[in-house]
Image: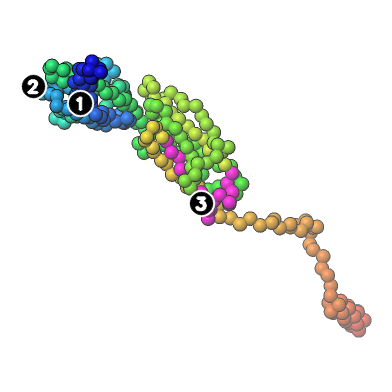
Amino acid sequence: MATNLLGYLVLLPTLQSIVTGLKITKVDVPRYLMVGQRATLGCHLALEGEVLYSLKWWKDGKQFYQYIPQNKPPAVVFTVDGITINAAKSGLTQVELQDVQLSSSGQYRCEVVAEAPTFNTDVMAANMTILDTPDNKRGPKVTGIKPSYRDGETVTLNCTSHRSQPPAILTWTSGGHEISEDHLIEYPPTPDGEPGQMTSTLGLVLTARKSIFTQGVLKLRCSATIYEYKWNTDVTLHLDNVTYSQPHHLPTLQQTESAAPPISATPGVQLLLQLLLLLHLLLGTTIPRAT
């Protein structure tokens, strides 16, 4: 029993140093950023009674930053592709990267080492991905819109998100609801622009009906999504405000334009003609002929 107790007492300082030694509590690395933005990298420490000897940052196994409090100056910057450090805003707890590029994507690792005699070391890493969307900052482009549509006419639109890495995911919605796949035409992304950049297109086909046009108007939205970034383009379609009636059947003409239409004589007209004829006959018999 005494032997076992002695073993526990020997192990206790070792266990305590593991639990209470220098350690990294959290690493802050932006998950996604756009080309040209700034990235603030944070490495939060718990000294637990120890003294920090050094803090180092690595990208994909290459060291780009070092901070040793005892040195003058304490910070040292190393050249690594895709890394541009803003020294004025970098120190022990954070490092600022400016004007990030696609080459800035990768794994970022913070490493801390304690002073002698323990030289305890702790490491924590996180990934960062840089997105390239030079043409999508104002939303995807919608083409094929007509000034208005007739009832029953086919509506065909295309939504295009140009040149991004990775390619954008496109969706069509109306009134906050995604439009059924039955009305969509999916096109594969195509290479466009710089190496790795892709252009995405999603088509929409539907029939213009009064039932889907609220007071003659249909509002649609096309969204381009790349990870947590999203851009929208809204369009409005109009239905012709025309009331259609049954066609009127015109009568068939019996006469040509040169033929005069027949005159229908009424009984009064017939009596007048008979009187004129009688008067003509009387006058013709009473007037003597010239010799």
* Position above or below: 24 against 286: above
Q: Check disc 1 and report the residue beneath it.
A: 20
Q: Check disc 2 and report the residue beneath it.
A: 70
Relative placement, left or right, of 115 versus 43 is: left
Kind of residue sitting beneath label 1: Thr
Q: Residue at x 83, y 70 (%)?
A: 264
- Which span of residues is magenta-colored? 207-224
Calculate the distance from the C-alpha at mark 3 to the C-alpha at mark 2. Answer: 70 Å
Q: Residues within 10 Å of mark 2 (few under 14, many from 20)?
A: few
Using the rendered image of the protein, determine whether residue 26 is visible from the camera's viewpoint.
yes
Magenta-colored stretch includes residue 219: yes
Magenta-colored stretch includes residue 36: no
Calculate the distance from the C-alpha at mark 1 to the C-alpha at mark 3. Answer: 67 Å
* Label 1 secondary element: helix
Q: Residue at x 86, y 77 (%)?
A: 267
Calculate the distance from the C-alpha at mark 2 to the C-alpha at mark 1. Answer: 23 Å
Relative placement, left or right, of 39 versus 88 is: right
Q: Position of residue 184 (x, y in %)?
A: 54, 36
Kind of residue sitting beneath label 3: Val
Q: Position of residue 13 (x, y in %)?
A: 19, 20
Q: Check disc 3 and report the residue beneath it.
A: 217
Q: Nearer the viewer, residue 223 or 31?
A: 31
